[in-house]
Image (cartoon, rainbow, N blue to C red):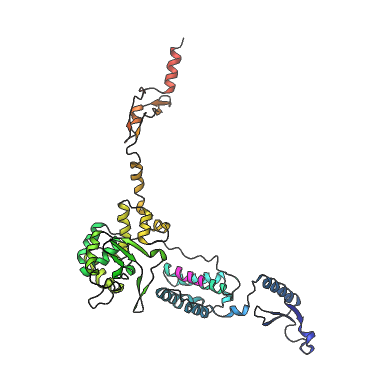
Amino acid sequence: MSHVEDRWSADPGRRGRGKRWRVRWRDEARRPRSTSFELKRDAERFCRELDRLMDAGLWVDPQLGEQSFGEYGLRWLEGRRDLAPATVALYENLLTKHVLAHVGGVALGAITLETGQRLIAGLQDGGVGLNTVRKAGTLFRQIHQASVDEGLVAKFRLTGLRLPKEPRPEARFLTQSEFESLLPHIDSALLGAVLLGAFAGLRVGEVFGLQVGDVDLAAAKVSVRRQIQEQRGAVTYRAPKTASSVRTVAIPGVLVEVLAPLVEKREPGEALFVTESGAVVRPSNFRHRIWNPAVIAAGLGSVPFHALRHSSVSWAVEHGAHMRLIQQRLGHAKVTTTMGVYAHLVDHLDQELAETLTDGIRIPVAPPARPQRCEQHRGLVSSPERWLSTFKGFGVVGDTGIEPVTSCVSCKRANQLRQSP
C-alpha cells in the first residue's frame, strides 16, 4: 500500500524548499518508489488512484513509457522471429521510411489518438500512396498494442484511429483465347509453370517451390508443401502462406504430359523447375526474362502472373464449379475469402438459374385467368390466353375450363341489372 508523508516535518532543514508532500510505495518487483507533490490533496488523490490500480493489477510504471516509440519499435521488430523474411523487410521499410519520421521521437506513454491522426495526415500530405498509408497505420497500432501487452503502457489509445479506405483493385482475368495466344511465347522448359498457374491456381512462389516428389503423375495430382521466397538476393523455402495453403490439387491430363519429362529419372528432393545450370528458377528472373516478354509479345498489356490464378477461377465458374471446391483448390482458409474476391463472377448466373428452375416441370391445371383493366370502368377484364402465354417452359395438361371474357366485372353487373325484371 502507498502512503503520503510530509517531507518538511520529517526533515525540518528542507522546510520551504522543494515539494512538500511525497507518496511512497513499492512496485510489483518490491522496489521502493516515490513521487512528490506541491499540494497534499494532489498527493492523496494520487495515492488513492495508485492503490486502486495496484489492487486491480492495472498499474504501470510511468517511467517504462518514457522510452521513444522509435527505440521500442525497432527492438520489437528485431524480436519478431516468427515473421517471414519478406514481412520483416516490409515492416522495416515502413518503420524507417514512414512511421519513425513522424512519431519516432514520441514517448510510448505519450501516444494518444491525436498522435496516430498526425501520423496518417503527415503521410497523406507527403503524397504516400493509400495502400502504404494503411499498412503504416496498421503497423503503428500493432506496435502500440505490443507495448500495452508488455506492460509498458497502461491503456491502448488508438481505438478510434481511422485509416483511409482503398478500393480493391480489379482483378485481371485472361480469356481462354488470350491465354492460348500467350503460350507460344513461353519457353518450353517453363511451360509447365504457366500451366500450373492457370489450371491448378498456384501462386508463383508455390510453383517454383515445387519439388519432383510433389508431382504424382499416376494420380494426376500436385501437392503444395512449400513456397520459395527471395529476400535481399537470397532464395529460401518457407511454409505456404497459410495452413490451408498446404493442399493437393488435381491437374488435367495435358499438364501431366508436360510435367512428365521434368519428373522422370530425377530425385524427389530436386527442384521441379531449374535453370540450365541446375539452379532453382527465381520468381523475379522468371518474371523479367520469361513472363513479361511473353505477355508483351502476345499483345496483352500489363498482366501479372497472379492473373493466371484469377483466370483459373473464372474458367472454373464458367464450367459450373462449386465455390467450395474452388476454395479448396486455391488454398483459402474460408470460403468467404473466395466469395469476397470472386463473387462478381457468379452474378450473371442468377438469371440462368432462374430459367433452368422450370426445366422439366409440368403444371396439371393452368392458373386462373388474370383480370385486367377495362378502359370504360377501369375494372378488370379476364384474358386467359394472355395470362397463360407468360408461363413459358411449362406444359399445361387438362382442360382449363376458362372461357374468354371481354368485359370487366362492372360491365357484367351493369348487364345483369338491365336484364333483371
**Left or right of residue 61, residue 334 in this image:** left
Q: Is 80 rendered above or below residue 406?
A: below
**Left or right of residue 117, residue 326 in this image:** left
Residue at figure coordinates x 40%, y 74% from the top left = 86
Stretch in magenta = 133-142
Q: Is residue 84 visible?
A: yes
Q: Is 312 rendered above or below residue 385?
A: below
Q: Nearer the viewer, residue 337 or 37?
A: 337
Q: Is 178 rendered above or below residue 141?
A: above
Which residue of the protein is positioned furthest toward the bottom in this rendering?
13
Q: Quadrant of residue 182?
A: bottom left
Please give the count of numbered marks on the rendered protein: 0
Q: Give percent across and percent down for residue 39.
A: 74, 78
**Left or right of residue 208, residue 24 in this image:** right
Residue at figure coordinates x 36%, y 63% from the top left = 247
Say which quadrant the N terminus sits in: bottom right
Q: Is residue 187 visible?
A: no
Q: Give percent across and percent down for residue 70.
A: 51, 79
Q: Give percent across and percent down for residue 128.
A: 42, 71
Report the predominant secondary structure element of the magenta stretch: helix
Q: Quadrant of residue 381?
A: top left
Q: Quadrant of residue 232?
A: bottom left
